Amino acid sequence: KVIWLRSGLYGDETDGHIDNIAAFTSKGVVTALGCKDKDDYNYEILRENISILEHETDAHGKNLSIHVIEQPDPIFENERRLTASYINFYFVNGGLIFPIFNQKKDKIALDAIKKIVENRKIIPIRSDRLILGGGGIHCMTQQWPI
């Protein structure tokens, strides 16, 4: 089953890195990026994506369980907004490499993900410079064919 979401984050040069906006964190469980600031460019995009997920089911027709983590505060480089996201994490054996951005919201996001994937060790990695390349931890850990 494929679930199509509306759009990616504002300024995403790929028109929608899914790993910035939603990720399955276990069977039938999706963690999605949210935004509470109605004046933020991402507010409507993320609200609609979450609404789509709330009305979807898994491949067996069961409703998905949705967890929302609030997006980091905007990060700018040369007046360009970067695509910062707490959802761009990477699962490793027994752990989860999790992006942080040297913000107050990092602790809230870390506390949330610890509850969502409580059986894994969370390894926070400062990512505010990493995203200058246009991707996050999950993007940068893509497999390289041998």
Image (spheres, rainbow, N blue to C red):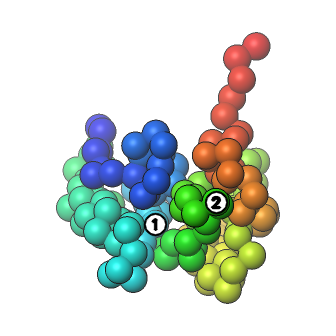
* Residue 97 picture quarter: bottom right
Q: Secondary structure at mark 1?
A: strand
Residue pictured at 27% horizontal, 52% vertical: 6
Amino acid type at image mark 2 = Asn
Look at the picture and state if 89 lies above or below 75. Answer: above
The three-letter amino acid code for the residue at tag 1 is Leu
Q: Residue furthest front?
A: 78
- Where residue 108 appears, x then y in whole percent? 62, 83
**Between marks 1 and 2, how big is the CA–CA gap?**
24 Å
| Labels 1 and 2: the sequence-earlier one | 1
Question: From the viewer's perspective, is 38 left or right of 99?
Answer: left
Q: Position of residue 113 (x, y in %)?
A: 60, 71
Number of callouts: 2
Q: Quadrant of residue 124?
A: bottom right
Residue 38 at x, y percent in the picture: 33, 81
Answer whether residue 2 is visible to the viewer in this image.
yes
38, 76: nearer the viewer: 76
Q: Which residue does the numbered mark 2 point to in the structure image?
A: 78
Mark 1 lies on residue: 33
Asked whether residue 50 appears in the rendered view, the answer is no
Q: Is residue 15 above or below residue 143?
A: below
Between residue 65 and residue 78, name the one nearer to us.
Answer: 78
Q: Which is more toward the observer, 72 or 86?
A: 72
The quarter of the rendered structure image containing the C terminus is top right
